[in-house]
Each structure stands twice: as C-alpha cells, then as structure tokens.
Amino acid sequence: LTNLAEAAPGGGGAAAPPLATATASAASPERPAARGALDGSLEAALRVAVPGEAPGFVMASFANSALNDHLVNFVLCAVRARAPFVIGAVDQAAFTMLSARRDAPTYVTPMAKEGASLDGSNQHSSGSWKRFAGMRTGEVLRMVRLGYSVLHTDIDVVWLRSPEPYLMCSGEASRPGGEHGPGSRFECGPLLSADVAVSSDNMSPGRDTEGRASYSAGGTFNTGILFLRPTVKGRAFAEEWHANVVSPPPGSRYVSLTSDQQVFNHMMRKPRQWPGVDAPHGSAVMREAWDGGRVTLGSLPLALFLNGHGYFVQRADLRLKVSPFAVHATYSLDNHDGVAKRQRFREAGLWLADGEEYFRGRFLALNASVPPAVAAALGAARSAGQSPNHIGVHAAALRGYLAELRDALALARALRRTLVLPRWTCYVDKLWAGSDNIIGMGFMYPGSQDAPFLPFACPMDHVLSPAAWAKAEVDYRDAAILDQPQLRASGAVVDVGLEPRPGWTRKAGSLPLGTSAAEARELLKPLAATPVLRLPHARGLLCSIDDDAAFNSLADRLLRIPTWCAKCFQPCSKELAGWLPAEEIRRGGGWDKMSYCMKVDVPPKFDAGGACSLNVQP
C-alpha cells in the first residue's frame, strides 16, 4: 500500500473464505499497550513500544491520515499479535488520532513537522513518493543507530503473530523441539548471521521453502517487510541505503531510481548480473550482497511472510501447513489502492477496524451456487478427461454471477436491505495486465505454479471493481460477515425458498420465480425484522422492479467484470479453440492476433415498460 494514497470512500465486501477469526472492534483492542508519555518524539514512542533499559526488537511503519482506517487495522492486528511497534505519523492529523488511543505508540515524523503537502499519488515516480521514501529510510536509520533491531513494515501488512521469536531467535520457539529450533523446517539460528533480511515478491511459497536464498534471490526483494539488525554492517548499510535514496551520487546507477525498494535491489546485486548475489540452495542467507559482501543478506521465508497472492489466492499456508506471521496485501487488483486492500482483508476476516455498527442492520445474502451453464461445462470437461479450470468455464461462471447479482442487488434495494455478496468460485487466475502467458501456465499467474490451486474462492476484485462500488456509494458486505457470532445466533438467518410460479403456493419465506420487486416486498413483510434473509440463488428471480431507470444506470456501472487479458503464443483462434467458441474469440480481439481480452456482457436491463425481463433465458 502506498502510504501516501488518498483516502477512499467507504464500502467493501466480497467473496472469499474466512481465513481468520476477527472479532475485535476498532474501539476495543484485546491488549492495550503500556501507556506512556507520547510527546511526539521517536524516543518517547520507542520507550512505550519497548519498555526496559536496553533497545530491543521493534516493528516500524509509516502512514498519514488519508489511511486512518488502515492505520487502525494495523494497530489492532499488531496488538492482537503482541508484536512491539511504533508508527511514524506522516501528518499531524495521524499523530493526533493515534496518540488519543491507548494502544498505538506513535511519533511525529520530519514530514509531519514540516507540514509537507502530499499529492496522494501511489506512483513510485511521484514527488510525494520519493520524499516519503527518503523520510522512512531515514527514520529506520535513526532507530538502527539507537540500537534497535528494526522490522520495517508497510501499513498494508496484517500481523497474525509476533515475528520477534523467529527474527531474534529467542524464547521457547528457538529451543530444541521448538517451532524454530535446531532441525526445524524454519530454523531461526542460521538467520542470526544476517545483518539485513528481506521479503520477496516471488509467487511460489513451496519452492521458497525448499530453495530459500536461491529462490528468493531470483525475484524482486520487497522492502515492505525488511529487517535490519544494529550490527556494524547493518548500520553501515542503513546509512548508505538512505543516502542513495535521498541524494544518490551523480552518475551512479541509483540516480534514475524512483523508490527505496529499487535502490535496495540495486545495492544488493552486482551490476549487470542476475541474480547478482551468491545464494546457495537451501541456505537462509546470501553471500556477496552489497558490493561483493559488505553485508550478509537473509531471506525471510515466503511461507511465513506471505504476499497477497500466496495467501488470498493460493492459500499456501493451508497447503504447506504453516502459521504465517504476516500477510502483505500485494498483488491486489482493481486500482491496487486502499479500497482494494481493505476489501481483501475484510473478506479474509483480517479487517478489525470496523466498529460494531458495521455488523448491525438488515441484510439480504446471496448464496453461492453453480450456474447450470457452468455445471454443464464442468461435466463436459471431466467426461473428456480435461481440466475444468480454463477460460471457457470461467467466462460462463462470470456471466452467471453477474446475472444473479442483478436481481439480488435489485431486491436488496427494494427491501431496503444491505446486500451480502457470495463466495464465488474462480476457475482461472487473473493478471494485473495482459502481457504475460497465463494461458500457457495452466491459467495460473506465471511463477505461481508451486502446486495446483485452481479453482479458488474469488476475491471481489476478480469479479467486480471495489472502487466502482465505493464510488457509487453502494453499501454492501462480504460473506465473512455471516461468520460473526451475532449473525450465527438461532433465528438470525432465514433461508428464502424459491419455486417455479406454476404450482407455487403462498407460504412464509417463499417467493415464486419471475416475481416483481413489489410482490417480493409484500411476500417478505412477515420477515422484516429478521437480520439476514438468504437467497439460495437469484436465477430467474425478478421480472420487473419499481425504479428500473435508476437501477439500470447503476447496474451498468457496477455489474462489469475487471479487464481480463492474456497473451497467446500462437494465434488465439488456435490456442483458445478448445475452450471458447469462435465468436467469443473474435469478440475478444484474438482471432488472428496474439492477445485476447475476455468479453462478458452486462446483464439485461429491466424493461422500462414493465415487461418481464429475466436475467436468464427460461
């Protein structure tokens, strides 16, 4: 997450399994930090975060008030994890908000003292980002100079457990038989020789677990989770890293770089070589890093410090049977901003910043179901001995999801209820851009072929645009809300029956298919006080609604899938022929070309004259 991103409108919820239990609210941290005098200085914040006379381990993050919701979530998760931390407030408003809490050791950064004006850009080439990068590397340097072992962490990292026992190799976990003791899968001892240790943007946690440094070196080092020890070499590196970010020597290879992460990667590798460091297979550390060995560089295990793809899409933690320390919301889609990242955390049960009011109200939940066209495609693929995880099945699924969503959203509005989105299934992965060979990689993100993870529970940004829903100010929730204790109580959820109109008889909690919004509203009146009404599906549910013009305009903006494009390595008419009909390939622009973009139409509009307009063909 760019710590300078502008505040985004509220909203957010979608379709993924509950990956963690999140019951603490923004107003009630589980373990308040020791309260001390926060006078705006770094030293005061460190005294609160790390009580005692000697410096120790501390996590450090930085953000401004535009990201207040992410700041609160970071604090609540770190407190729950019992991980010591400080937050550098990038503006005075962030310091005021955080210092009023009982759980957030915070201080005023130089940017906040200067009243720096931020442009809100999340582009690494922006002036704001460069200034921010220089400030935070300088603040990390200050802490290292004070003798602290500093784990720099972006604000879009959720901490599930404290990484201190692993990084400092201390406590029960480091002893024989402990989680990180001698001979364990993630032994902490070898990492003690590292002056600096860093996470990576690699995509295969299993390969990383096996290869460690050799695999990590082959990808981009991600300074969003970066550990520096106050060793002689660690301090020297922190000094030069900061200097190369804020004032690179004229003519050096750092002059054209636009972020602290780019500078870090270039410093650690030999020029014009790849990977440019000596990274033995299975080792926890890399040799010859930074000018041929001025520092020992450690690799933070990807399985323990998971990126967004490894956690939200692959669920590598379950496959590898590990309990990660952290989840970094990288590889989110849509605008890749605070809205998208908040949505990922919410649907995963990792968002604690919602107050109790978020869980109150009356909801209409759309249950996940398999559209008939998808069931037929899955059956045909299996009968032919083929994988059902391909673009043809996925396109059919998206068409079905949007069609059902039309009626569910319309009915929720008619009932004055908040829509709860289902946990949809994705049959292919999705890229940021269509320049990679996802087709040739079995429809998995290139580099993530660690183990089969298709199909998977779709994050919302694989099906819809969270930003578009936020901009339209349409309130909704994700399926994880149904796991909250207050909505699991007896009687809190009532399943609405759907039956074909021929033969349907009026009874409580039942609707005829092909109903109108007005009729449905009347039939469901006896259940008006029920917190959650749940639809088994919404195929053929509504014929007509009251506010068709307004709703059709809204649906045209909201019921659109994000762009899905891919590169073909032979004409797409040949490469995709086994999965898509010729007309669909032509519509996607890929008939005689080497690229394809999936086209999924917006569901049919409700008829302005009141004629029946079903979302599926009878």
Image (spheres, rainbow, N blue to C red):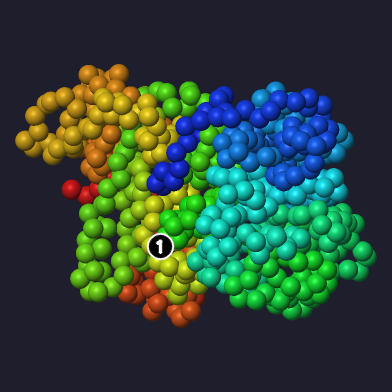
Instruction: Identify the residue position indicated by label 1 in the image.
Output: 453
Q: Measuring 67% from the left and 40% from the top, which residue is drawn there?
A: 84
Which quarter of the figure has residue 251? bottom right
In the displayed orientation, state which residue is furthest to the right.
250
Q: Which of 64 and 60 is in front in this view?
A: 60
Q: Where is residue 9 in the image (x, y as percent from the top left)?
A: 58, 34
432 w.r.t. 366: above or below: below
In the displayed orientation, state which residue is furthest to the bottom.
570
Q: Is residue 269 left or right of residue 530?
A: right
Q: Nearer the viewer, residue 446 or 321?
A: 321
Q: Where is residue 236 in the image (x, y as percent from the top left)?
A: 86, 59
Q: Is residue 599 left or right of residue 55?
A: left
| Amino acid on which disc 1 is placed | Phe
Q: Measuring 9% from the left and 33% from the top, which residue is drawn there?
A: 504
Which quarter of the figure has residue 88? top right
Q: Is residue 155 left or right of residue 127?
A: left
Q: Position of residue 99 (x, y in %)?
A: 72, 26
Mark 1 Cα-neighbour bin, 10 Å: few <14, some 14–19, many ≥20: some
Q: In this view, does 179 lie to the left or right of 107?
A: left
35 w.r.t. 182: above or below: above
Q: Measuring 50% from the left and 52% from the top, which residue is drawn there?
A: 323
Q: Please, what secondary structure does the residue beneath circle 1 have? A: loop
